[in-house]
Image (cartoon, rainbow, N blue to C red):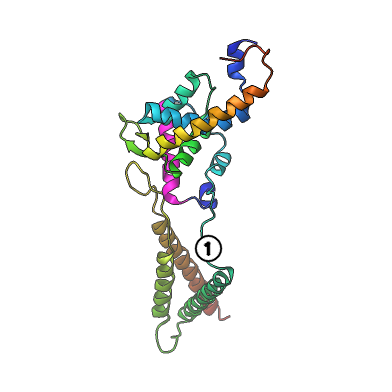
Amino acid sequence: MRLRMLDVPGERIGEILAEIEAHVAATGEPAREAFGPPADYAQQWKPSVEPERRPARRRATGFIGHLAIGLGISFGLVHAAYEVGRGVPVWGVSGWWWMALGLLLVVGSAARVPFDPIVDPRSGQARSNPRRVVVVGVAAVTGLVLAGGMVAVGRLVTLGI
Amino acid sequence: MQDTELITTWPTPWTRASLEITVLALVCTHGPTHGYDVARRLRDAGLGEVKGGTLYPVLGRLAEQGLLTSGWVAGDGGPGRKIVTATPEGVAELHRRTVQWQGWTRRVAAVLPTDATGDGS
């Protein structure tokens, strides 16, 4: 985590972790004793050159754009869930279809986020699959929120509120 | 002061300053080798105990400068080991730095008093 925060590339992180594992296995020395506290050790790998970033204005514009799209989709999803709970179609189409479309957009956006996987140099395999974790997590959270919202609206409608 | 006492009490700035060139020299002389072998050789040379947390970033910096290359070989049921080898640029750089280092230590020695004893050698 600390290495990620220091902008160390995933491939390099994989190499650093493998070095520690190999050293500990060969010497029997506890990792903390050989390498010190993880945060201090990570600091030693801080890149000497800051990675190139987009200009601040472009980053801000991109952030605002993504925020607006995210809010729009969220509003659409909540609205669709509300109408499903009430049993009313949205623009002549069942709210279920709008929710499916919104969910697809949310999961599709999560899947397009660029990831820099931590690769174990000995096997060439990623240590974890962050893309899958994020996509499944986003889909699960969105689904749960929508389901909860629909149940709540359904209850309110039943109670005539 | 005894030699052994001196060996365990080298001032940290000295070991830091000399670590990169000594690690490069050991890899050039004994490579292909691996990190803990380099640490053992540093200790056997009387340069003190160099922990993995100090040594591996040095190896990493040398590799970043193109002076070393590395690759992984499978271990016997273990997690494998990283083998480092000096590049031709590393060998040339070692020669250049050795000339500089020896020039520097000669100048330092010329300034120091000549009647001191217990030089640790």
Q: Indicate left or right for B73 with B63 as reference.
A: left
Say which residue appears at 58% left-offset and 26% top-offset.
B105
x, y percent for residue A68: 54, 76
- Above-or-below relation of B93 to A66: above
Q: Indicate left or right for B111 with B58 as reference.
A: right
Please tell me which residue lies in front, B92 or B78: B92
Which of the 4 quarters of the picture holds residue B34? top left
x, y percent for residue A109: 43, 69
Which of the 4 quarters of the picture holds residue A27? top left
Question: Which residue is labeled 1 in the image?
Answer: A53
Q: Secondary structure at mark 1?
A: loop
- Above-or-below relation of A48 to B25: below
x, y percent for residue A7: 52, 53
Prevailing secondary structure of the magenta residues: helix
Please tell me which residue lies in front, B87 or A154: B87
| Residue stretch in magenta | A9-26
Count how many numbered circles sit on residues in the image: 1
Residue lying at the far bottom of the rendered structure: A92
- Which quadrant does the C terminus of chain A fall into? bottom right
- Above-or-below relation of A123 to A98: above
Please tell me which residue lies in front, A32 or B31: B31
Q: Indicate left or right for A52 with B89 as reference.
A: right
Q: Amino acid at mark 1?
A: Arg
Residue A24 visible in the displayed image:
no
Residue A20 drawn in magenta? yes
Residue B61 drawn in magenta? no
Which of the 4 quarters of the picture holds residue B113? top right
x, y percent for residue A69: 50, 76
Residue B117 visible in the displayed image:
yes
Say which residue appears at 59% left-offset and 25% top-offset.
B106
Residues packed near mark 1 inside 10 Å, few (<14), some (14 to 19) or many (20 plus): few
